[in-house]
Each structure stands twice: as C-alpha cells, then as structure tokens.
Amino acid sequence: MMKKRQFLKRFGVGSLFATLVTLSVSAPSLADSDQTYRWSLLTSWPKNFPGLGVAPENFAKMVDDMSGGRLKIRVFGAGEVVPGFEVFDAISNGTAEMGHSGSYYWKGKLPAAQFFAAIPFGMTASETNGWLQYGGGMALWEELYRPHGVVPLAAGSTGTQMGGWFNKEINSIEDLEGLKMRIPGLGGEVLSRAGGVPVSLPGGEIFTALQTGAIDAVEWVGPYNDRAFGLNTAAQYYYYPGWHEPGSMFEFIVNEEAFQTLPEDLQAIVRQAAKTASYDMLVEYDARNIEALNQLQESGVELRRFPEDLLQKLQGYADEVVQELAEQDPMATRIYESYRAYQQGAAAYNHVAEQAYIETRGQ
Amino acid sequence: MMKKRQFLKRFGVGSLFATLVTLSVSAPSLADSDQTYRWSLLTSWPKNFPGLGVAPENFAKMVDDMSGGRLKIRVFGAGEVVPGFEVFDAISNGTAEMGHSGSYYWKGKLPAAQFFAAIPFGMTASETNGWLQYGGGMALWEELYRPHGVVPLAAGSTGTQMGGWFNKEINSIEDLEGLKMRIPGLGGEVLSRAGGVPVSLPGGEIFTALQTGAIDAVEWVGPYNDRAFGLNTAAQYYYYPGWHEPGSMFEFIVNEEAFQTLPEDLQAIVRQAAKTASYDMLVEYDARNIEALNQLQESGVELRRFPEDLLQKLQGYADEVVQELAEQDPMATRIYESYRAYQQGAAAYNHVAEQAYIETRGQ
C-alpha cells in the first residue's frame, strides 16, 4: 500500500504542499502527523537473546506496523552502543531514546529500583502487574525515575524463576554452608546470610564454571533459558524450584524529552505496544518453559524440592534483606510499604482462587 | 494537535488535493490513510458492566488514541442493537463490524466453541493464553469461525472463578444431591451428574432468588462481581473456591470483510489493542478481586473448602462431560486433543514453578 509521503513524492506535490505549510503557524501539527521518527533502543542483553532479547524486537515491529512506518525503532544489543549496565545513563542523557533492561542494575544509583525487578519471596508476575497498574506501583516507579528524565514502562517477565542446579541434594540449611553458587542481587545476599558464597558470573561463563566444578550451584532463569545454555548437560545436577525471583520484571525506559516530541497517537502506540510486549513475554516464557521442562525431564534431569524448614529460614533472611533495602531512603520505604500491602492482599486472594484451584486439579 | 484532515479543510487545500488524487490510480491508498472508519461493537453485557463491559470500552479508547481518531468504535450494550445471545450472527451477517462476547454462547451452532471459553477442571487464564498463542489454540479458533466470516481475538479473562455461595456447608458429594444451584454450561452438566439441579438464571435475578431461598446455591464470577451484586448480603451463605471455570476466556469477534477493508496499520492497531485489552482485563479482575475479597472477609463472609474426595468425583464427571463434547464433531476432537496436551504440559511446569513457589511462600 502506498503511503501518503510516497504519493506526495511521486506526484510532485510535496513542494507545493510544503509551501502551503510554511505559511501557517499550525505547521508543526502537519509535520508531526507525517514525519518519520527514527529511534534507537539499547538493551542489556545480547542481540536476539531468547526471551529477553525477543521482547524489544517484537515491540519495535509492533510500533512499526501500528504507526504505518512513522516510528522506526532500531534495537541494539549490549555493547553495541554502550555496555549493558550503562543503559539507564544513556537514556537519561539522551544518547538513545529508549532502552530495555532490568531495574536492579541501577541499584548503585537508585536502591529502591530493585522493587521493580525481583524481590526474594515477593510477588509473582501477575501480582506484580496488578500492583503496577492498580496498586499504585507504576506511579511510584515513574516518580523514582522522573528526576533523571526517564519514563519507565513495564517490559515483561520471565515468570517464577527456578531455584537452580545443585551438585548435591539440599536437605537442610547446613547443606548451603560454604556452597559456592552463581546467584546475583538480593537472592545472593540471602544465600550469604544462610552461610553460602554467592558468586557473580556473566551468563557466558556459567556453563564452563559448572562443568569444571569451579562452582557448586547456579541459578540462571528457568527451563527455557537454562536448557538453551545446556546447563543440564554440564554435569549431573539436581534441579530445584525457586524462591529468589518469583516474578522478575523488566523495563522499557524512555527519554522523557524524546517521548514528549512524539505526536499523541505515536505516544499511545509506544505505551500500548510496550504493554503488549510486556504481557507477551510472560506468556512466551510460560509456553517455552513448558516445552523445555518436558525435554529436560526426558533427558533425565533430577527434580527435587527444598525442605520446608529450609525455605522458612531463607524467607526469614529475605525479610531482613528486604527490610534493610526499605530503610535505605524515604522513597525505598514508600515503595516497600506499597509493595508489601499489595502482596499481602494478593496472597490472600490467590489462596482461595487460582492456588486453591491448582491444588484441586492436581498435576 | 491539529490533524492533517482538519488542516486540509481549514486551509482549503482539500479540493486541490482531491483533484490531484483523482488523476491517479493510486488514489485508494491515500483515501485509506486519511479516511475515518466508524465501527459498531456489540456486546453481550449491559453497557459498562464491571469488568466485562469495561474491556470493550478500553479497547475502543485505545484504538481511537493509537489511530489518531481514524478508527472510531462505538460500543453497544446487550439489547441495544441485537440481544446478547445474537452477537455472533450479527457480526457474521455484517449487522456490525465487531462484537465482545463469550464463545460458549454459540454452542448450539458450534459445540467446539466452548473450548475457547471455560472448561471444568481445565486451564487457568495464563495457561489458556499460552495455548492460544504458542500451542496452536488460536489457529484452531480461527479455523472454527472462518466458515462464518468471523475473525476471533482473545478478549480477556476473569481469572479463576469462585465455586459459589451455598446455604449449607458441603462436606460430601451427597450434600449436592437435589441442590438447586444457578450454574450454567458445562459446569451445570457436571453438577447434574453429581445429583444436583442446575438452574439457569440471568444475572439480574440471582440476588432475589438467593434471598427468597428459591435456590440453594449460586455461582456468579468472583469477589469483585459477586460483591457488586450484593450476594454476600442476600443471606448467610458459605463461599467456596471454584473448579468449573478456572480461566474463563472472552472473545472479540470481527467481521472478516470489514477487517480486510482496513489499511494495514489499522489492522495492526485492532489486533494489538485487542491483545492489550485482553491481558488488562485479567490484571484488572485480579486487582479488584483482591480488594473485594478483603471487604467480603471484613463483612464476615465464611470461606470454606470442598473436601478433596468430592472434588475428585466432580473431576471424574467433568472428564466425562468434556470427553462427550470432544466427540460431537471432528473439529471438537481436534481442539480437545490440542487443549488437553497443552494442559498436561502446563500443569507439570506449573507444579515446579509458580505453584511450587506459592506453596513455599504460604499465605
């Protein structure tokens, strides 16, 4: 289908039209509705990384389709423009218009940002979506980023992450003593209080570290991403359900000035496409995880469960860690209180609704 | 912001431009990109009914915003144009371009359509979304409606519905013997096989039937909608978790010819806005249910759980009912097989992922 701009060009009315436009004070609105915007979107992942890298590509395609090509967004992998951990600054200072990342990466600058990513023993993905949209979470997130000229938008979840791969069965809290485990962030801090040794390792080094026995355990994401890394083939490991990232949420971040220069229809398209990409990522992770878990089980992976009393102790440490985070600044306190209140209500409802049903249905 | 059409009008270049256009065979593409489309959307609910009636209004607003006003969709309540149960035919025959309804209403014409609405002991909302998008479900739904010139789009879920309000505690399957309960569809058929008496009652008559004791039990939706109807104040009733509609899904339906006449960018906008409205409805239901359950509990509602052996017996009857539905025609068989395979994988994954976590977290 030929677009108006092409038509104007082909039939030579562009210059006539442009002349008319320059006579009018209303010119900007015409320029807006016809102008093509070209944006860069910087991510913290390798280009096209399964799941995480797919969401921003889907987003860019949706925006292109819905805008009839008036907003073109080019997606860059980590390191192509700036390193993955510098995406926030790059969006804040206008190096690029948009980013796709995780808010826990900005904890050095904004400790409270971690509440919008992953809280040990915190909310699931669907609960987090409810909190953001109807429980006041999104307004707090916007308030946190506003001084930096950055607009946050929810950008997808992996769902409940698995607890990881262990080179021995974990039967009590003592089995965590001295355990060297790749586990970042707040979850790592919890492990440390339980006597373990959290290790920081980029994704690309995990397989080798497992295979050589340099570490005893690792958590990465879940069946889909874990299997893509071949973690099930690195050694004979036991695979456990998770507690540390129950509903990891990612973020689109937009340079506020760039956002304001868009005409209103393109602003609406960016917001809705982000929302759809966010929801889609969770649905895709769920679907791919189902398939991958099935394949893992066929390949002989040993699934285990942590004992109940160990989990209760971890939850106690997690409460301490999150409480300390909440006390770091007044904004962290406000976000924590909002988060916690929503989680309590959500857990009570879940208990009589979906959770009650799933227990009923059995496996 | 002034739109191009307004500009053309105000500065009198419309007719000049139109003249140029008529000289060109490419005129339709210009007409497309500038034309305003006006659609009607017929629903099966009262106008602005909480939850169900909100989703199509949100959808229409999103489309308006994203299209810069080029696609205007007017939403009609049940009975305003056609009765609620005639929406499918009205879209099929072109009375209106679009509808918002539930596929189980078309079971007389298309028994297999029920798989896209609510299956007792079937999939949850998130599992259903996964099946539709990644498990082949959507392609089957499209195939089912294609001979009728109707395009289906997922249009939101209430989440797991509650099992309902009962005038006595239900301690065994015998307590269902002769029980007069408002419960429609496949769930009603299951109750009937368990010795109960399913009663069909429109929403507006439920409160009075409960209050006068004309019926012994009722299921409606969940805390949010149930409380809006005042079911907790009708009489002293016990409130139970559900099994009959674990992930009720609704539908947008579009007249295929009308859809094809839209330019590609508006088609993309309709598809993505429907997706977002669909996901949003579930998130909104979850959030409103959390709040409403809290209020119900404060008002003294007595929550109970069905005994495990009763649920197992109901599940046995449900398996029979769904199996018989699957045998009604070859399309129903294919959809059933796809549905069942996805549910098995989803249940296995849920068991080690979110479900395992939620059990861990406790309430």
Image (tube, coloured by chain):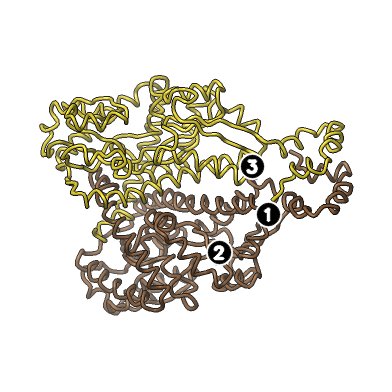
Chain colours: A brown, B yellow
Label 2 secondary element: strand
Q: Which mark is residue A72?
A: 1
Q: Is residue A237 visible?
A: no
Residue B117 figure quarter: top left
The chain to which mark 2 is attached is: A
For the residues tagged 1 and 3, is the chain the same?
A: no
Residue A164 rendering spot, x and y as whole percentages: 35, 65
Q: Amino acid at mark 3?
A: Gly
Residue to which mark 3 is pinned: B69
Residue B253 against residue A4 in the figure, above or below: above
- Whether marks 2 and 1 lie on the same chain: yes
Is label 1 or label 3 in front? Answer: 3
Q: In the visual, does A86 lie left or right of B263?
A: left
Q: Left or right of B242: which side holds B4?
A: right
- Secondary structure of the residue carrying numbered label 3: loop
Q: Residues within 10 Å of mark 1 (few under 14, many from 20)?
A: some
Does residue A132 show up?
A: yes
B302 left or right of B73 in image: left
Residue in the foreground of this view, choosing between A105 and B217: B217
- Image point (23%, 73%), residue name: A173
- Name the element at disc 1: strand
Residue under pointer 2: A151
Separation of marks 2 and 1 at Cα, in angstroms: 19 Å
Which label was assigned to residue B218? Answer: none
Measuring from the top left, give residue A170's x and y in whole percent. Answer: 25, 68
> Which of the two discs, 3 and 2, sits closer to the camera?
3
**Hey, what amino acid is under mark 2?**
Val
Label 1 marks a residue whose chain is: A
B257 in relation to B54, above or below = above
Q: Amino acid at mark 1?
A: Lys
Q: Quadrant of residue A137?
A: bottom left
